[in-house]
Amino acid sequence: MHFNFLHGKCGSRMKQQYVCPIDNEVVERKDMVRGYEHTKDTYVRFTEEELKTLEAERTSQLELLEFVPAASVDLVSIEKTYYLGPDKGGDRAYALLSESMERAGRMAVGKFAQRGKENLVLVRPYKKGLVLHEVFYADEVRDFGEVETGGTFEFKPIERDLADKLIEQLAQDTFEPTRFKDEYAARVLAAVDAKVAGNEVTVSEEAPKAQIIDLLEALKRSVAATTAARSADDAPESAPGGGPKKAALREDEAEKSVG
């Protein structure tokens, strides 16, 4: 969902301006230069002409450099995804590449120049065709070692059993995006329709969150709720006004104090 900023007084769409904090004046684009922060608050300046000389060569060609096992690609590296279609007269080679990579279980690693930048990309087979993923360079991905994970733990058999049961009860053979709905977008669009129709949008009160600090207890509750929901689904008739039939580990249930 995308919103625009409007002036609350008259409803006009706002325009962005660049203001110099030293001179306290609006600066036009023609009076700007680009700067790379070399050290703290110290910038190396570049003109647009200088930057153009550094841009990657403009080309519509996608250069494939190597083919790697699909399972070796970490999803954390993927930035954007695009559908790829064949050029005129290239449909046979396009289909052959897709079919061959599918059989080999591999993706192509390549480079593609766009807007002056040389992008690292992955190309993989998809539904008898190809898709292209823009991926981050290695130095653009944060080291996971910087994330505090809490250390190493020894788990009790009952803890492993509960976690295994939760996964088993919610397991699906495949990921199907159509099983899920963007409920926030649906609420926003419903509110838009209500406002267009001249109705007021009602604000519902937020339900109080349960204060559960024991993750093991949270797993027990989630497994029990899932089991009950599955039993209700299997019943010939469901009682009117019943609760939701699906269960998951709620965010508030997953809170845990370490001490």
Image (spheres, rainbow, N blue to C red):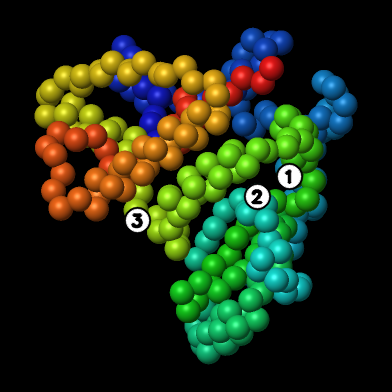
Question: Is 176 left, or right, of 239 in this rendering?
Answer: right
Mark closest to the chain's N terminus, 1 or 2: 2
Q: Amino acid at mark 1?
A: Val
Residue 63 in the image: state x and y as whole percent.
71, 72
Kindly identify which numbered label has been placed on residue 178. Answer: 3
Kindly identify which numbered label has been placed on residue 76. Answer: 2
Mark closest to the chain's N terminus, 3 or 2: 2
User: Which residue is drawn at the image coordinates 43% and 36% (left, top)?
Assistant: 222
Quote the CA–CA distance across marks 1 and 3.
Answer: 30 Å
Residue 13 lies in quadrant? top left
Instruction: Give the camera-side residue of 206 and 68.
Output: 206
Image vertical order of residue 117 relative to residue 242, above or below: below
Mark closest to the chain's N terminus, 1 or 3: 1
Question: Is 26 left, or right, of 6 in this rendering?
Answer: right
From the image, tell me which residue sits under label 1: 141
Residue 21 lies in quadrant? top right
